[in-house]
Amino acid sequence: MKKKEEKIWKKRFFALSLHVKKERGDNKGENYSKDDNKDGDKDGGTDGDADGGIDGGIDGGTDGGTDVVKMEIRKAARMAAKMTARKAARIAAMAAAMVLMTATVQGQVLYEIWGNSSHAKSYLLGTNRLTDMTFLDTVPNVFKMYARCDKVITEFAIQDYEAIAALRTAAILPDSVVLENFYEPQTYKDIDEALQLTVGMGMDKLCRMKPSYLTEMYRTELLKKWAGYDEKRSMETFFEQAAIQQGKPVYGLDDTGETMYIQFDREPFHWQCKELEKAVRYPEREVRQEKALRELYRDGRLNDMAYQVSGPDNNTTISYSDYQIYCRRNTEWVKRLKSYLKDGNCFITLNAIYLGGDEGLIAQLKAAGYRVRAVNRRGG
């Protein structure tokens, strides 16, 4: 991890650790120096969380701040320093409230789950891989809700190294299958040239990999070059990595076999070949779709994200048939979440395209008897 990315990650992990210590009511936890949290606005983050300056007075009240938000908070902080602690808190809270009246309201990507014999609340965060981890500064109370939980639930546990090795093996074609035989000579040449240009390797080195693997590899490199995707700064695995650092258990909803199926075999082989060709022929569609999903995510429009994927106008490699598979998997996930949700105090982090829509995870949780609502700025 580069120095800048490391500082960005450490700043948010530092804020997370403060909330964890506050929830536990002790002084244990990660021993980070104040220098780790001095990066301020250099990394594109915001000072909306209480850990950014006026602790308590504006806690959870200025998430999602713009530059105007930060200026007003700093002004309030300077004024508050000259007054008593009680007046300082009142001034800070008033400043935050005034800013919120004019700030753009972010949509909801964090939800609380309870009911159906649950012993305590759990929390569900939708993520987006193109979105920088600094976006977490704009999600109301997300660090506080994480600190209340004693376990993290995700799609696939990244620390399961044996499973990761098995996935890499599963991406390889059987010896009896020759990928070149499934394409016209010119099409195969076009795919080779596209991979050389974008990935840096051609079919001479990649011909033993499954088409679904090549498609995802190609899409990922496209997004890095044309959509600003940076896996080291992505919010997608932030809480899973933080949990590992803090010693919290991390559980995957899918086992290795199911992950293999979703990644490499959810579509027939001949269709995988067509999808790879489609991605190479129309790379702009893939990039445009992911950018659209990112904007919908940042607005908290989860239902629109579901329609963006499943709608008839989507001609990308992840479309209606994939969405139907996700919906069927949501049904299984609700069953697997039952024991976790009964105990409560779970922090569930999943790709936001799984959550919205009539068959999304949120709708299916409600249908199963759970109460699900957005976490408000006061912490629910």
Image (cartoon, rainbow, N blue to C red):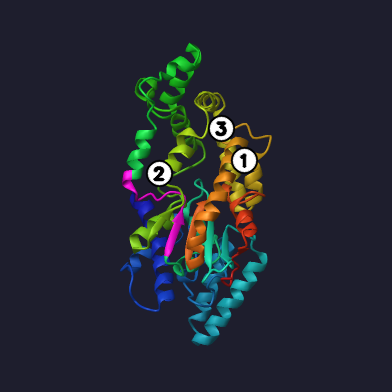
Residue pointed to by mark 2: 256
Q: What amino acid is labelled 3 in the image? A: Thr
Q: What amino acid is labelled 1 in the image? A: Val
Residue pointed to by mark 3: 317
Look at the image and tell me whether residue 42 can be seen. no
Residue drawn at x 60%, y 68% is: 376
Image position, residue 36 (x, y; %): 35, 63
> Callout 2: 10 Å neighbours few (<14), some, many (20+)?
some
> Callout 3: 10 Å neighbours few (<14), some, many (20+)?
many
Q: What amino acid is labelled 2 in the image? A: Thr
Q: Residue 117 — which label? A: none
Instruction: Say whether disc 1 or disc 2 marks the residue closer to the N-terminus.
Output: 2
- Secondary structure of the residue carrying numbered label 3: loop
Residue pointed to by mark 1: 309
Magenta region: which residues? Answer: 151-162
In the visual, does 26 lie left or right of 70? Answer: left
Instruction: Say whether disc 2 or disc 3 marks the residue closer to the N-terminus.
Output: 2
Q: Compared with residue 77, is residue 161 higher up or lower down, i.e. above or below?
A: above
Say whether residue 222 is magenta. no
Residue drawn at x 41%, y 24% is: 196
